[in-house]
Image (cartoon, rainbow, N blue to C red):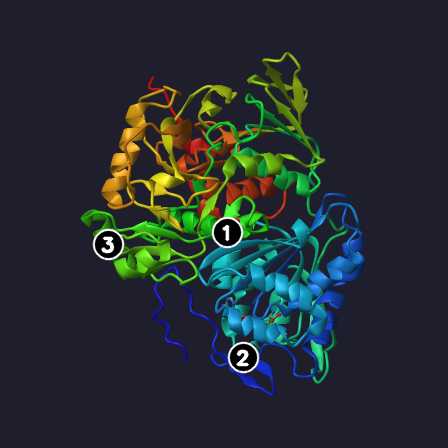
């Protein structure tokens, strides 16, 4: 049996034995699927008894069908549902959401081996494997099939999953090993939570026909029936939550205006557009990604905390999600060449040691390296150890923003400065500098450090603008690294003859010009961190650079969600997506996904604790008196 002393955020993987090519759990002593024909069993028990192909066809335009499952295992049920969705979905922009909890996830290798059993599912299995998250506990959102399928995979106990996630299921797949072998899955509390995540008309099916489970489901209001089981199983049960009428998951309706075409606004616009929602993307600049997101290069970087607390969990989820989200841009705007977090001074070395003692991360996220290995990986001599993030790298954020904004459902209004938001007959009226006003059902303010002036609520909002200047290093002046190096400054590999380094961190200056002092600070600190980096020039001379203003909050956590005042009273139709500080490239993909979930009324990709930690009302400060 696997040693269960894994430290967070790692999660204990499943331990399998393969008998006649079929995976069995060592812990539970049961098979993952029928020895007769697992795929046919899935179709019979879960798809047919939830009447899925027919119900898929009834999903309204821009709607969602939500399936929740207990025990993701090999993902066979998910792939079978995805395959059926492909065949039967209405061609109307609707989405299949599949939510599954798994306490002992399969390793990537075991997942591959198990799914190799189903050649007809091979293309879907390959896509699932390419997106399969690292084995860390918590919530993982996978966006598949160009957004037509969204999988929320919770690695942890199902009771925690159903407490943490907010969704309402249309259908349940109650899988799991036999109740006698896996009683935790069938506790009364688990069944009560299934009811809490259901609504009138929600159906469920399970392979088991155990009387206690049937009665518990009936006790929660499900009308249950016993029917013949698959293969050698005599019976199974299926049911529906009693109702006169059955409902549907809510649908996205109306128009959305997004103020700010930086990385957050551009990703959100593209996310909504790919869900079929029409968006107006507005920016005072004359093209997307021209303000803080306009640097030639930016590192995909997070500093993971020594404590595995909600802030660290958010940073880790955002990092893993962003790596998946940028994958389609690999080689174009995204360069996952690896990133070294250098232990550049004794304090950072001590912090890294405490971090490594306290936590356990899969190697696909990070691992420690000594100075020799760090030098080899980065192609630059470094004199200390560090943490190596093999799947991090750097982006061309400005170019990425322009690409994201180009979509038939995104109307760009650039060179337009929004001055005020006013409610008007259930919609929002945006008055702008150009005089051409914009009316939308919903508005997202993603305007970075300009956000506070647009919030249409009284009160003081605890945002800070931090001036950051980067310096452009010509290739011939340095020994260019082949990976990103971060410490007191960061340095990217060269692109088109330049490497971007930076950035300064100035809370008091509002000067938008590049200054000599800013460049001197960058170069001095960079050469302290990487002695021997500069070739002949020794880092002297006039360099070009760029200034941007990052937006951060009093607690350095981002802000995403529906706007609310100091009393927590929501402002219907207005959302914030900002406060990403210097980690915008990492946080923006996940938080854009989250805000798009809220706007479309679809299951949220963040668990309650994380959604709570970034809610907008926390930045409102009450005035004394
Ligand atoms: N649906 C899976 C498939 O398509 O391959 C098969 C599921 S398998 C029969 C049951 C799964 O439930 C196992 O992967 C097991 O690790 C998981 N499991 C058992 N107890 C659990 C718990 N308390 N919380 C979450 N998952 C659990």
Mark 1 / mark 2, whichever is N-terminal:
2
- In the image: residue 93, left or right of residue 70: right
Around disc 3, counting alpha carbons within 10 Å, would you say few (fewer than 14), some (14 to 19), or many (20 or more)? some
Image-quadrant location for residue 526: top left
Asked if labels 2 and 1 touch by Cβ distance under 8 angstroms, the answer is no
Q: Nearer the viewer, residue 259 or 6?
A: 259
- In the image: residue 369, left or right of residue 125: left
Q: Nearer the viewer, residue 448 or 374?
A: 374
Around disc 1, counting alpha carbons within 10 Å, would you say few (fewer than 14), some (14 to 19), or many (20 or more)? many
Residue of label 2: 180
Name the spot of residue 129 as percent of width and height, x first.
58, 64
The kind of secondary structure element at disc 2 is: loop
Around disc 2, counting alpha carbons within 10 Å, would you say few (fewer than 14), some (14 to 19), or many (20 or more)? few
Residue of label 3: 384
Q: Nearer the viewer, residue 474 or 322?
A: 474
Question: Is residue 31 positioned above or below 431 on the image?
Answer: below
Q: Disc 3 vs disc 2: which is toward the camera?
A: 3
Name the spot of residue 356 as percent of width and height, x first.
29, 59
Name the spot of residue 283 as percent of width and height, x first.
57, 24
How far is the residue under mark 3 from the one under mark 2? 54 Å
Name the spot of residue 55 as percent of width and height, x first.
78, 56
The N terminus, quarter of image: bottom left
Question: Is residue 447 positioned above or below 315 on the image?
Answer: above
Question: Is residue 114 positioned above or below 558 on the image?
Answer: below
Instruction: Name which residue lies at 42% across and 53% down.
Output: 338
- In the image: residue 484, left or right of residue 78: left
Residue of label 1: 323
As drawn, the label of residue 457 is: none
């Amino acid at each position: 049996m696997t040693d269960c002393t894994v430290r967070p955020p790692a999660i204990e993987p499943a331990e399998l034995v393969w008998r006649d090519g079929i995976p069995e759990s060592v812990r539970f002593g049961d098979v993952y699927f029928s020895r007769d024909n697992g795929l046919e069993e899935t179709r019979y028990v879960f798809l047919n008894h939830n009447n899925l192909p027919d119900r898929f066809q009834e999903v309204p335009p821009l709607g969602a069908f939500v399936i929740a499952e207990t025990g993701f295992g090999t993902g066979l049920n998910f792939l079978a549902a995805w395959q059926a969705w492909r065949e039967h979905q209405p061609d109307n922009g609707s989405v299949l959401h599949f939510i599954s909890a798994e306490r002992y996830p399969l390793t990537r290798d075991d997942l591959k081996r198990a799914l190799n059993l189903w050649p007809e599912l091979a293309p879907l299995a390959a896509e699932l494997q390419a997106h399969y998250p690292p084995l860390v506990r918590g919530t993982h959102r996978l966006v598949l099939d160009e957004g037509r399928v969204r999988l929320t995979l919770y690695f942890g106990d199902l009771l925690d999953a159903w407490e943490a996630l907010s969704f309402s299921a249309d259908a349940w797949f109650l899988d799991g090993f036999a109740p006698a072998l896996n009683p935790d899955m069938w506790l009364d509390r688990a069944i009560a939570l299934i009811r809490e995540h259901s609504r009138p008309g929600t159906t469920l099916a399970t392979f088991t026909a155990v009387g206690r489970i049937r009665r518990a489901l009936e006790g929660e209001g499900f009308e249950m029936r016993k029917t013949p089981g698959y293969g050698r199983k005599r019976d199974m049960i299926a049911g529906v939550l009693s109702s006169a009428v059955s409902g549907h998951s809510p649908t996205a309706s109306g128009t959305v205006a997004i103020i700010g075409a930086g990385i957050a606004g551009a990703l959100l616009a593209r996310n909504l557009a790919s869900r079929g929602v029409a968006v107006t993307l507005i920016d005072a600049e004359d093209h997307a990604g021209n303000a803080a997101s306009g640097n030639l290069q930016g590192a995909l970087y997070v500093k993971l905390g020594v404590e595995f607390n909600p802030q660290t969990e958010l940073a880790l989820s955002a990092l893993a999600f962003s790596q998946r989200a940028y994958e389609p841009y690999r080689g174009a705007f995204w360069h996952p060449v690896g990133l070294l977090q250098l232990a550049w001074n004794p304090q950072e070395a001590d912090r890294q040691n405490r971090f490594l003692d306290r936590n356990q991360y899969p190697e696909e996220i990070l691992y420690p390296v000594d100075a020799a290995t760090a030098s080899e990986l980065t192609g630059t001599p470094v004199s200390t150890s560090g943490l190596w993030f093999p799947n991090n790298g750097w982006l061309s954020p400005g170019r990425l923003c322009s690409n994201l904004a180009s979509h038939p459902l995104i109307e760009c209004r650039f060179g337009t400065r929004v001055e005020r938001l006013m409610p008007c007959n259930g919609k929002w009226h945006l008055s702008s500098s150009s005089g051409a006003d914009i009316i939308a059902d919903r508005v997202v303010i993603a305007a970075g450090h300009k956000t506070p002036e647009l919030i249409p609520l009284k009160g003081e909002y605890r945002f800070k603008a931090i001036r950051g200047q980067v310096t452009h290093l010509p290739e011939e002046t340095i020994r260019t690294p082949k990976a990103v190096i971060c410490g007191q400054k960061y340095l990217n590999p060269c692109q088109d003859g330049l490497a971007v380094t930076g950035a300064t961190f100035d809370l008091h200056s509002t000067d938008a010009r590049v200054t000599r002092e800013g460049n001197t600070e960058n170069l001095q600190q960079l050469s302290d961190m990487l002695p021997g980096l500069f070739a002949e020039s020794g880092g002297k001379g006039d360099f070009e650079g760029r200034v941007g203003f990052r937006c951060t909050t009093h607690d350095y956590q981002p802000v995403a969600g529906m706007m609310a005042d100091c009393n927590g009273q929501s402002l219907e139709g207005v959302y914030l997506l900002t406060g990403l500080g210097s980690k915008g490239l990492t946080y923006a993909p996940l938080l854009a996904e989250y805000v798009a979930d809220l706007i479309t009324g679809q299951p949220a990709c963040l668990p309650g604790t994380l959604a709570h930690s970034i809610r907008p009302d926390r930045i409102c400060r009450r005035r004394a008196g």
